[in-house]
Image (cartoon, helix red, strand yellow):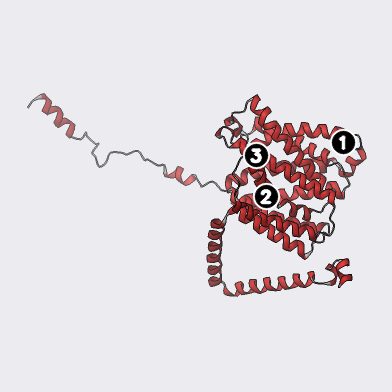
Amino acid sequence: MSAEEKMRMSGDIPRDGASSSSAPVLPTVNPEAEKSQSPKPTIPAAVYVIAWISLSSSVILFNKWILDTLHFRFPVILTTYHLIFATIMTQLLARYTTLLDGRKTVKMTGRVYLRAIVPIGVFFSLSLICGNLTYLYLSVAFIQMLKATTPVAVLLASWAMGVSQPNLKVFLNVSVIVVGVILASFGEISFVLTGFLFQLAGIVFEALRLTMVQRLLSSADYKMDPLVSLYYFAPVCAAMNLMVALLWEVPKVTMQDFNNVGFSMFFLNGLCAFLLNVSVVFLIGKTSVLVLTLCGVLKDILLVAASMLIWGTQVTPLQFFGYGIALCGMVYFKLGYDTLKSYAAESGRKWAEFGAARPVLRKLIILGSVLMTVLLLLSWAGPSNIPTGLSTRI
C-alpha cells in the first residue's frame, strides 16, 4: 500500500472517542441569552399624536393667556424670549445629545447662511411678530379660522416665486378654503380690522417663509428636520426680534408687567414653545406628514372649542358653516381625492365590521350623534344667538 493511500485511509477513520455522532457541536444560539433578551418596548404612535396636539394647543392658549388675560401687552418681547430660549436649548442639544446630528449632513456655508437662512429668518420673525400681535385683538377661535387660508397663501407665493407652475384646477380647489373663511369672517361678532390685518400679514409672511424653505430644501444638500431648521433660524430671528423689541416695546415695559405674569410662567411658556418643535420631529419621524396634516385639522377644531370654553367666545352658526367648508377644502387640497377615497373606503369597512360585531352600540352612537346635532341646531336657533340688528329687522 502506498503512502498516499495510507494517508487517505487514516483520514477516513474517526479518532478514538470522537465519532461523528458523539462529537460536540458549538450551539449557534445561546438559549439562555435568547430567553433573557425581551423585545424593546415601543411607544405607540398615538402618544406622539397626543403630545403634539397638546403642546401645539398649549402654546397658542398659553400665549393668549399671557398677552390678553394677564395683560402682558408686549407680544414682540414674548416672541423674542421664545427665540432666545430656543437658541440656547438647540445649542445645548447639539452639544450633549444626538437629536441634532442631522445638521452634520447639511452643507451649510457662510454664503448659504447669509443668502438663504437670514432672509428666511427675517420672514419667520415677521410672521411670529404679526401672529402674536393678533392675540391682542381677536379671539383664538377666529384666529384659527383665518389660519385656514395659509395653504392658499403658500400656493400663491410658490407661483409668484416660480417654485411651482400655476394650475387652474388647484386654484379652484383652494378657492373653496377662501370662500369658507370669508363666510366665517362675516359671521364673526367681535371683528377688529386691526387684528384681521395683522393676522393677514402674518399669513403672508409665513407663506413667503415656507416657499423660500421649499426652494432651499429642493436640493438634497439642505434636507433638514424642523429641529435642525430651528437650530439655524432661531439665532437670526432672536436678533431681529430683539432689535424690534428694543425700539418698540422695551421702553414701555416695567418690572410690574413681568411680575404680573411670574417668571415661572415665562419659563413654562418658553419650554412649551420649544418642546413643540421637538414633538414635531418625533411625530413626523414615527408617523408621517399625512398624520401631521390630519392632526393639524383636529387641533384647530379643539382650539375653537377651547376658546369657547375658556374665554366664552361666541361662535355663530355662519362661522361654523364657513369654517367647516374651509377645513374640508384644506383637507382635500393637502391630501387629494385618491387618498381621501382610500381612507373613506377603509373607514367604511371598519365601521361595517364594528356594526357586525356590536350592532347595539353602533345604533346608540348613531342615535347620540343625531340628538347632539339636533340640540346644537336648536341652541344656535335660539333668540340669544340672533344678532341684535337682525332681530330688530325681523
Q: Furthest residue to the left?
A: 1
Nearest the viewer among 82 and 187 is 187
Q: CA distance from mark 2 to mark 3?
A: 14 Å
Residue 243 shows in the view: yes
* Location of mark 3 (residue): 161
**Rendering coords of residue 81 (x, y %):** 79, 37
Q: CA distance from mark 1 to mark 3?
A: 32 Å
| Labels 2 and 3 touching (C-beta < 8 A) | no
**Element type at marker 2?**
helix
Q: CA distance from mark 2 to mark 1?
A: 31 Å
Q: Nearer the viewer, mark 1 or mark 3?
A: 3
**Rendering coords of residue 311 (x, y %):** 83, 57
Neighbour tally class for label 3: few under 14, some 14-19, many 20 plus, Cα within 10 Å: few
**Element type at marker 1?**
helix
* Location of mark 2 (residue): 152
* Location of mark 1 (residue): 248
Q: What kind of residue is marked 3? A: Met
Residue 133: which numbered mark, if any?
none
Q: Earlier in the sequence, mark 2 or mark 3?
A: 2
Q: Is residue 150 left or right of residue 107?
A: right
Q: Is residue 394 left or right of residue 362?
A: right
Q: Nearer the viewer, mark 2 or mark 1?
A: 2
Residue 47 shows in the view: no
| Labels 2 and 1 touching (C-beta < 8 A) | no
Q: What kind of residue is marked 1? A: Trp
Q: Earlier in the sequence, mark 1 or mark 3?
A: 3
Q: Earlier in the sequence, mark 2 or mark 1?
A: 2
Tell me the quadrant of the picture where the N terminus can be found.
top left
**Rendering coords of residue 42 (x, y %):** 56, 48
Residue 186 occupies quadrant: bottom right
**Rendering coords of residue 364 (x, y %):** 64, 74
